Amino acid sequence: MKVTSSSLIALAAALASASSISAGVIAPRQASSAAPSATGASATPVGPETASASSTVDSMTDSAASASASSGSSDMSMSSATSSPSISASAPAMASPSALPSYSSQNLSSYANSSVHGPQGLRNSNCRNLTISVSTNSSNIQYIDVDDQYSNQSYITAQILQFTNFQMPWIAAHENGTFVSQQDYNVSATYCTPMSMNSTSSTNSTDSGNSTLIVASHGIGFNKEYWNFLNDTAPEYSFINQATSDGYAVLTYDRLGTGQTSHPESGFNQTQIATEVSLLANLIGQLRNGTAFEGQQNYTKIAGVGHSFGSLQMQALTATAPDLLDAVALTGFSNSSAGIMQFLTGATLTPVNQVFSNVSRFSNESSVYLVNGSPTSTYELFLWPPNYDPEYAAIAAGPEYADAVTLGQLTSQSALMMSADFKGPVFVISGEHDLPFCAGNCQPPLLDGVQMLYPMAGNFSTFIEPASGHGLVVGYTGPDSNRRVVDFFKGNGL
Ligand SMILES: *[C@@H]1O[C@H](CO)[C@@H](O)[C@H](O)[C@H]1NC(C)=O
Ligand SMILES: *[C@@H]1O[C@H](CO)[C@@H](O)[C@H](O)[C@H]1NC(C)=O
Ligand SMILES: *[C@@H]1O[C@H](CO)[C@@H](O)[C@H](O)[C@H]1NC(C)=O
Ligand SMILES: *[C@@H]1O[C@H](CO)[C@@H](O)[C@H](O)[C@H]1NC(C)=O
Ligand SMILES: *[C@@H]1O[C@H](CO)[C@@H](O)[C@H](O)[C@H]1NC(C)=O
Ligand SMILES: *[C@@H]1O[C@H](CO)[C@@H](O)[C@H](O)[C@H]1NC(C)=O
Ligand SMILES: *[C@@H]1O[C@H](CO)[C@@H](O)[C@H](O)[C@H]1NC(C)=O
Ligand SMILES: *[C@@H]1O[C@H](CO)[C@@H](O)[C@H](O)[C@H]1NC(C)=O
Ligand SMILES: *[C@@H]1O[C@H](CO)[C@@H](O)[C@H](O)[C@H]1NC(C)=O
Ligand SMILES: *[C@@H]1O[C@H](CO)[C@@H](O)[C@H](O)[C@H]1NC(C)=O
Ligand SMILES: *[C@@H]1O[C@H](CO)[C@@H](O)[C@H](O)[C@H]1NC(C)=O
Ligand SMILES: CC(=O)N[C@H]1CO[C@H](CO)[C@@H](O)[C@@H]1O
């Protein structure tokens, strides 16, 4: 299948302008010329012109977090002549004191305990590693006047500063239409089935086409190990363990450029979200028709769970190929990207071959692969003190779990699209103080805004993890948020 970045949406358009927060929508690139998806789905990019957006605007205006409404949603509307949306970076207005949101700094350490799990217990995973060959066919952004190999740190820093401070000029200077990118990649996956199965519903795990498979796509800064956090020492933090404790099979995979999946040495051309969505579509197609398992088995029910950038990709998949997933859980997500620019500057992005120069899997990595410059960046962008174990946070920020991203991935996101034909259930769960997607404040009705993307969803629900940040799995509420995703699938008959 083909995924078009022309129908994807500029990260830049998700600026912390009032309209992007309160209307909760991100203007698409090239909406007028959006190519139909190969599946024939009506994957309409969602823009501020979407009438239903306004209901969210009204209910948000009391919140200081909704910032200034003065720029108006017209600022987010499309420029049909260019490939770029127009942007207005309005400064947040000062709210009246009575409207100031409160923040919570509870220490919820009691949430993380080994009694949080399903009926089969936390040691019910039978796992093996797979390498799956996938093909992608996507319409990628044609970057111009960029250094696809990033000559040095100064170049990287310059792009981050120019992009975060001058989104429109940056896009105008460096993006010029699209090109069709067709690539073959090797995807590294971990596949776990439950060892025993004596409770839930429809699922008989092991190698039966009747069970439900959960496919998990991680976010930026991590690889698939995000979904298996602390398996050895605190197994309740592992999403895989929580899912198999309820009889689900799980497949986690390293997204493009991370872990043991292919690492194209291309900082812009190949590593783009359109390629990644195409990769995910091909992967799930192979899990359904059995190609991924060399014909030994296949799955007819597949639920998707994403975190952050992985959620953007799952969301795009439900829009472009609505039949591939039976349900979707979007974690660390909203339809606002109000804090993305803070997120980008706060990351202090640095080539991983420098940050982890003494770690073998990173020491020879291409300089296009970037990670947070220090553990403190990870704490600030992904956590909310004191709601995490400092030792576990340090592990999450270290080379065991950290992984890289390119400027192409960062500047080609994000991909909020109208999932007009997706009929499965949809769950959104984010930390109360998620930085990139809520600018630190996910109070209602922010997450509910996602519902406008899913007019046909069988069921739509949201949850805000108290006193938690963007990196849901890592904090004290990690086991709880994992459970809530699994319970959501179970509660919807998967
Ligand atoms: C474990 O955490 C859950 C929340 O996830 C909480 O409801 C439960 O009371 C906790 N149990 C203990 C023994 O602390
Ligand atoms: C599941 O099976 C195990 C082992 O046979 C048993 O100990 C456990 O109580 C069972 N759980 C349920 C919910 O039936
Ligand atoms: C987690 O640890 C258990 C027990 O050591 C092991 O059986 C399982 O394969 C591990 N999970 C993964 C995904 O490696
Ligand atoms: C899968 O590969 C990872 C390394 O990426 C390794 O740590 C893990 O032990 C492997 N799991 C199995 C079940 O072989
Ligand atoms: C790839 O996408 C192009 C452009 O949309 C399309 O013409 C072509 O048929 C696709 N190729 C495959 C193998 O799907
Ligand atoms: C890839 O990037 C380089 C810039 O380094 C550019 O000159 C080239 O045209 C790009 N290739 C494609 C296929 O877009
Ligand atoms: C943009 O693309 C068009 C069509 O491929 C080409 O004619 C034009 O020269 C490109 N502009 C720049 C600045 O590269
Ligand atoms: C799978 O489902 C079919 C039809 O519902 C049923 O006949 C079969 O026994 C099931 N297989 C397993 C292994 O549960
Ligand atoms: C299986 O699905 C993949 C992805 O859609 C596709 O490329 C492949 O041709 C399919 N194979 C078979 C045997 O149907
Ligand atoms: C695998 O999926 C294909 C396509 O949906 C189906 O025709 C086939 O019967 C399935 N195989 C098994 C063993 O269930
Ligand atoms: C949170 O509370 C627990 C239990 O009192 C304590 O061990 C832990 O150090 C606290 N965490 C932080 C970050 O202060
Ligand atoms: C009905 C059925 O096929 N049950 C199977 C479920 O999986 C367990 C463990 O793999 C088997 O022992 C059961 O026979």
Image (tube, rainbow, N blue to C red):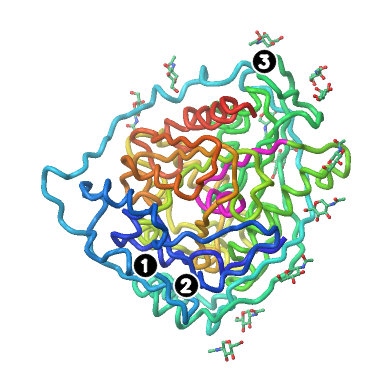
Q: CA distance from mark 3 to mark 2?
A: 51 Å
Mark carried by residue 366: none
The x, y position of residue 450, in whole percent, is 44, 47
Of pointers 3 and 2, the one earlier in the residue sequence = 2
Asked whether, in this view, residue 158 is left or right of residue 486, the answer is left
Select label 3 or label 2 by which is in front.
Answer: 3
Q: On screen, 350 above or below 381?
A: below
Q: Is mark 2 within 8 Å of ligand 6?
A: no
Instruction: Name which residue type carries label 3.
Output: Ser
For the point 33% across and 49% down, which residue is it?
Answer: 55
Does residue 166 appear in this view?
Answer: yes
Select label 2 or label 1 by which is in front.
Answer: 1
Q: CA distance from mark 2 to mark 1?
A: 27 Å
Instruction: Name which residue type carries label 2.
Output: Ile
Residue pointed to by mark 2: 156
Q: On screen, 402 above or below 207?
A: below
The magenta stretch is 301-317
Quarter-wise, where is residue 193 in the image?
top right
Mark carried by residue 199: 3
Q: Determine crowd level at label 2: few under 14, some 14-19, many 20+ residues with C-alpha closer than 10 A.
A: many
Q: Is mark 3 within 8 Å of ligand 2?
A: yes
Mark carried by residue 76: 1
Of pointers 3 and 1, the one earlier in the residue sequence = 1
Q: Are marks 2 and 1 in contact (CB under 8 Å)?
A: no
For the point 73% across and 53% down, which residue is it?
Answer: 187
Of pointers 2 and 1, the one earlier in the residue sequence = 1
Q: Quadrant of ligand 7?
A: bottom right
Select label 3 or label 1 by which is in front.
Answer: 1
Residue farthest to the left?
A: 97
Does residue 347 appear in this view?
Answer: no
